[in-house]
Amino acid sequence: MNVYNLLTDAGWPIIPLILCSIVAMTVLFERMFYLRKKIIFPNRKLEEYLTDCASHLPDKTTLTEKWLSTTVLGKSLLNLVIHCVTHAPFDRQSLRFQLEQSIRDTNTFLEKYLTLLATIASVSPLLGLLGTVVGMIEIFAASTPGTTQPAQLAHGISVALYNTAYGLGVAIFALLAWRYFRTKADKFQMDCELACNRLYSELLKYAVPSMPEDHALTHLP
């Protein structure tokens, strides 16, 4: 069945469902490409970074040549060390803030478009129900007393059944895709947080003690 026949048999309520299915497929292929280990988590890079920071902070040349990375975790680790190098001497509080910011940036990338998939999974059955109601209205309109309109009656049944089936199909597909990518994102989030915390612990030895807020106040007699 081509798209024209589907629109003819299912009526206009099927249009938003078709759009939802196209968006869901686009998100599926986008997340399949980007939620891969070689894009998120660099192999053996973390151990190299920990070794580089074991005795001293890397200089800017090392950061731009050796540490430059296109992976998500690589960028987060690089931002941590850049903060230490550019804000030296730095304290624990500022480094902790940079760690939290790096983790938030990583999580934002990993969760990209997942909310959209969940929304499609929730809305699609409602759109299918809308099409069902439209089909039922056509059925009742075709069943006026004293007249019978078999063509309109058949079309109303077709609209109701097509939209119900298509709405459930899109919802099931979007829900399964969301659950799969949600699981992958959670696993990568845990790995990235552990890696960032390991580097954070290594960088802490270069931090200066934080100054208490009331230490700098002048106490008047």
Image (tube, rainbow, N blue to C red):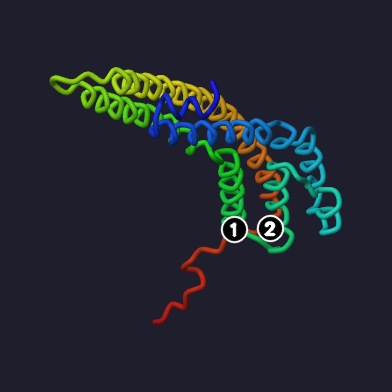
> Horizontal and vertical percent for residue 185?
58, 32
Quadrant position of the C terminus in the picture: bottom left
> Horizontal and vertical percent for residue 215?
50, 69
Q: Which residue is mark 2?
A: 83
Q: Amino acid at mark 2?
A: His
> In the displayed structure, does residue 183 sit left or right of residue 159?
right
Q: Residue at x 67, y 47 (%)?
A: 76
Please tell me whether mark 1 sits on a helix, a strand or a loop.
helix
Q: Amino acid at mark 1?
A: Ser
**Callout 1: few (<14), some (14-19), or many (20+) C-alpha neighbours within 10 Å?**
some
Q: Residue at x 65, y 33 (%)?
A: 35
Q: Residue at x 53, y 36 (%)?
A: 23
Q: Which residue is mark 1?
A: 94
The one of 143 and 108 positioned closer to us in this rendering: 143
Relative to 195, residue 179 above or below: above
On the image, which quarter does residue 42 sit in?
A: top right
On the image, which quarter does residue 134 sit in?
A: top left
Q: Are marks 1 and 2 in contact (CB under 8 Å)?
A: yes
